[in-house]
Image (tube, rainbow, N blue to C red):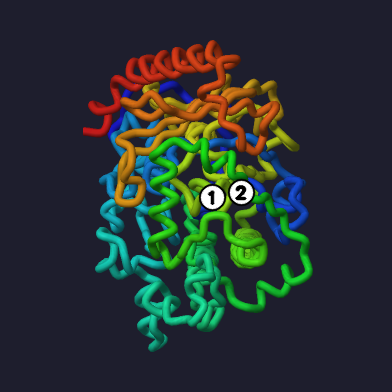
């Protein structure tokens, strides 16, 4: 990415740190034990939480993979960079800045660039895309490193063509047991590739930027069977789907849940308001995949230690968005519920004195300027970010007054041109372009977003005030990011 007007980094370490950015795919905020969710078996992430800084209210800027990732790696909102759906093209990232600053930039796993093999600033890429691409218009013919590993092992890739042969496929809700060797599971493959990359660069004098993209716990929810054992007798949280919730949802969300109920996207047949037993099985498989990823993150930390790089490393763990897992009657993402737009964000480093819990509102894109500042690189003036670095240093940190998320029409979310969210401390406002309907939740009274107040006369003033705030944000965004297009040409 070309250099534009920038603000200089302050106080970057004399010896630039290694930066490790771990991004899972579709991991909810309530999936890490140490964050207050004891149903999740995550010993490695629990350690990073205890010894590092964790942000309890981190929100993504896109309600599906590509918009969220492109925003994180460009420093601007989806409406600014134009990446509004999973088929949008994006190929330039701030990784180019790190490479120009002397970092050795390595990607292991999923970035989800379009095209999928775009260099995106990396010197090396071992690309692993979605676990199941059998129905994708873009990517079905793409052969990644994991595809080649499965072919070399002489096995058929599990996915919709194989899982739908199961006699109880329609009731699986995407939950399966991985049928091959554990080492061939996508997340184990990515974790091992990252460990090998760290070993290969152990003696490299250049600082390392390593992006590790785990394909899980995105569906199919198919962990190896051994990982399910730890959830066999665990009481898993479960919220029933309320009729009031379903009936109040705007037409695009009603159509979305019906599309899932009549489809097979990601080998995940959906049942609106599925019975408890089926939903608990789905959640157990999902969490078992999280636990497998947790093991792999531990292997990455150990590899940094063996390479003599851990003491000078900054490790960031987050996800691109979450997963409803049947909550609100929905499957997967493409909505603005907390289960989708709120993600874990943990930062661990011996170099950073900040520790503990940060409850301020932040956006996932706020990670980017902190990493560039730590690297001694420059942060563009036109970025729409607010650096997390003060919080990581233990300094006063107020966070944001409000956070935003966006989603354009795509192959799955076909029922509205543009949906966007504004969330404050108390309220959530969801806007549909060109429509009179929307969603409004008072999160103080209704933290689970089960009672839409959009048409409540008592909150009409609140709704219109939030609409005005949303308009002001869009105008301010257009002005602040006005140099975006020129800077990437």
Which disc is residue 241 wearing? 2
Location of residue 451 by image quarter:
top right
How crowded pointer 1 is (Cα within 10 Å; few <14, some 14-19, many 20+) is rated as many
How crowded pointer 2 is (Cα within 10 Å; few <14, some 14-19, many 20+) is rated as some
Nearer-the-camera pick, 441 or 346: 441
Q: CA distance from mark 2 to mark 1?
A: 6 Å
Query: Quick check: 389 above or below 240?
Result: above
Q: Residue at x 36, y 46 (%)?
A: 413
Location of residue 310 by image quarter:
bottom right
Residue farthest bottom in this picture:
154
Q: Residue at x 54, y 36 (%)?
A: 59
- Disc count in the image? 2
Residue farthest left in this picture:
489
User: Whole-percent x and y of residue 426?
Assistant: 64, 23
**Pointer 2 with pointer 1, Cβ within 8 A:** yes
Residue 281 in view of the camera: yes
The quarter of the image holding the N terminus is top left
User: Whole-percent x and y of residue 3?
Assistant: 31, 30
The quarter of the image holding the C terminus is top left
Q: Residue at x 28, y 45 (%)?
A: 88
Q: Which residue is mark 1?
A: 329
Point out the tag, 2 or 1, that comes first from the N-terminus. Answer: 2
* Mark 1, secondary structure of its residue: helix
Nearer-the-camera pick, 48 or 447: 447
Residue 309 located left or right of residue 136: right
């Amino acid at each position: 990415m070309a250099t534009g007007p920038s603000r200089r980094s302050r106080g970057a370490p004399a010896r630039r740190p290694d930066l490790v950015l771990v991004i899972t795919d579709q991991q909810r905020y309530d999936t890490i034990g140490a964050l207050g969710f004891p149903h999740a078996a995550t010993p490695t992430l629990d350690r990073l939480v205890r010894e590092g800084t964790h942000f309890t209210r981190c929100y993504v800027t896109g309600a599906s993979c590509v918009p969220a990732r492109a925003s994180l790696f460009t420093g601007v909102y989806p409406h600014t960079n134009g990446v509004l759906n999973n088929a949008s093209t994006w190929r330039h990232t701030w990784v180019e800045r790190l490479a120009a600053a002397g970092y050795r930039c390595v990607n292991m796993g999923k970035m989800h660039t379009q095209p999928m093999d775009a260099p995106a600033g990396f010197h090396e890429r071992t690309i692993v895309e979605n676990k199941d691409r059998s129905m994708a218009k873009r990517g079905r013919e793409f052969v990644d490193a994991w595809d080649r590993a499965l072919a070399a092992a002489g096995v058929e890739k599990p996915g919709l063509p194989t899982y739908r042969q199961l006699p109880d496929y329609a009731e699986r809700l995407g939950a399966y047991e991985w049928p091959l060797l554990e080492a061939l599971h996508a997340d184990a493959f990515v974790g091992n590739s990252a460990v090998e990359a760290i070993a290969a660069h152990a003696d490299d004098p250049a600082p390392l930027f390593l992006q590790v993209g785990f394909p899980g716990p995105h569906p199919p929810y198919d962990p190896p069977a051994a990982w399910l054992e730890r959830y066999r007798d665990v009481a898993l949280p479960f919220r029933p789907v309320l009729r009031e919730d379903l009936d109040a949802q705007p037409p695009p969300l009603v159509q979305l849940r019906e599309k899932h109920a009549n489809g097979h996207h990601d080998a995940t047949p959906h049942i609106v308001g599925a019975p408890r037993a089926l939903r608990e099985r789905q959640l157990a498989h999902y969490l078992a995949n999280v636990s497998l990823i947790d093991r792999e993150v531990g292997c990455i930390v150990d590899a940094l230690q063996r390479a003599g790089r851990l003491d000078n490393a900054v490790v960031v763990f987050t996800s691109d968005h979450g997963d409803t897992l049947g909550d609100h009657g929905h499957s997967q993402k493409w909505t603005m519920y907390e289960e989708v737009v709120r993600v874990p964000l943990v930062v661990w480093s011996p170099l950073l004195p900040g520790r503990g819990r940060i409850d301020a509102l932040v956006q996932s894109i706020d990670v980017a300027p902190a990493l560039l500042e730590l690297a001694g690189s420059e942060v563009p003036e036109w970025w729409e970010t607010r650096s997390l670095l003060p919080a990581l240093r233990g300094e006063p940190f107020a966070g944001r007054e409000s956070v935003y998320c966006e989603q354009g029409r795509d192959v799955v979310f076909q029922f509205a041109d543009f949906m966007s969210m504004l969330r404050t401390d108390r309220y959530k406002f969801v806007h549909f372009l060109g429509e009179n309907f929307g969603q409004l939740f008072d999160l103080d009274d209704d933290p689970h977003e089960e009672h839409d107040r959009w048409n409540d006369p008592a909150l009409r003033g609140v709704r219109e005030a939030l609409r005005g705030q949303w308009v002001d944000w869009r105008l301010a965004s257009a002005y602040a990011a006005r140099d975006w297009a020129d800077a990437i040409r």
